[in-house]
Amino acid sequence: MTDNCIFAGFPLDPADHMRGNEKWLSEKLDAKSSRFLLYARGRPLMDISEDLKPAFKTVDDIKAVAANDLTNGDNNWVFLGINGDVAIFAVAIAGKLDLAGHEKFIDLRSVALQLGADGFSAVPSLLGRGKILLEWNGRRHFCSCCGHKTQAERGGYLRKCRNEACKAEHFPRTDPVVIMFVVSGDKCLLGRSKGWPEGNYSALAGFVEPGETIEEAVRREVLEEAGVKIGRVSYVKSQPWPFPSSLMIGVQAEALTTKISLDTDELEDADWFDKTCLREVFESGGSATFKIPPKIALARYLLDAWLQEE
Ligand SMILES: [Zn+2]
């Protein structure tokens, strides 16, 4: 079993010890050696000339865009980390940017698989973290405690309320989601949500609610959505999911009951799938009534792992 999954494997030294050093950060923001990843509405700027890759920019490129003043305190940038002496930042572009013919802002989800062999390179992780942090900062310009303006500190990993009487500190959030691969002997439970393309089935999933353990969330979600009672829950693997800021927690869950009672507000269908039949479907690349979950999804990893078990 490999640790690889898309959006895992952050390639930089996140340099936590330097984030609070405002002088160092401002020097790096102005350094010729620094590199900048640009985003427009959450979409990273990609170089599409040959192999798809991020279009890294220099500080001079950034300054050429008048509306993007990195020192104006409006916090449209975040510090991602260092690679040797090179500091890497992510910048949300507000103004108009003259793009070269081989550059394009592209939805990260649509290209994550192409960014390296099977997508298992460090690039989706780097682009995903930039997206998460920029979008979080973009949504937290005002304090949720008192309504005053906030200001980014620590390279965008903290926003502090400017109201002296409040001074609340806000940190980037990660929302835990459980993905449940439910098994009963040599069968697994897969479902499809309303509006999914025909034949798409996947593992059930849901947000962990406040005050719940992972195990409790798994048992509640499966009972709510499919009416199936769950016993043992085993952690398998996790995956950062930057749409917008989740952590997918993949588990295998043992069913205590098999009768399905669908919550039709959540699911259009759910059913038990036989391991031998699924292996045949995988070998043939899918069927009209069952499309194999894409490799970008943790559900695919859970399914692959189970099919490889004896
Ligand atoms: Zn406040």
Image: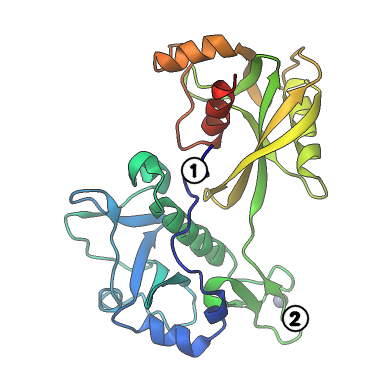
Q: Nearest the camera: 231 or 195?
A: 231
Mark 2 C-beta to ligand 1 under 8 Å: yes
**Does the image show residue 51?**
yes
Residue 184 at x, y percent in the picture: 72, 17
In which quadrant of this rendering is ligand 1 seen? bottom right
Q: Secondary structure at mark 1?
A: loop
The residue shown at (52%, 30%) is: 300
User: In this figure, which residue is indicated by the disc labeled 2?
Assistant: 166
Residue bearing the label numbered 1: 5
Residue sitting farthest toward the front: 310
Query: Which one is in front, 175 or 231?
Result: 231
- Say which element carries label 2: loop
The location of residue 82, given as percent across then percent down, is: 43, 72
Q: Earlier along the polypeptide chain: callout 1 or callout 2?
A: 1
Q: Amino acid at mark 2?
A: Cys
Question: Where is residue 57 shown, x and y percent of the image?
Answer: 28, 69
Whether tag 1 and tag 2 are in contact, CB under 8 A, the answer is: no
In percent of the image, x 61 and y 21: which residue is there?
190
- Label 1 Cα crowd, 10 Å radius (few <14 / some 14-19 / many 20+): many
* Location of residue 77 (image quadrant): bottom left
Image quadrant containing the N terminus:
top right
Up the image or down, 184 lies above or below 47; here it is above
Q: How is colour applied across the structure in the image?
A: rainbow
From this view, report whether residue 306 is shown above or below residue 51.
Answer: above
- Amino acid at the residue labelled 1: Cys
Asked where in the image residue 164 lies, by quadrant, the reply is bottom right
Horizontal relation, residue 273 to residue 39: left or right: right
Up-down: is 165 above or below 142?
below
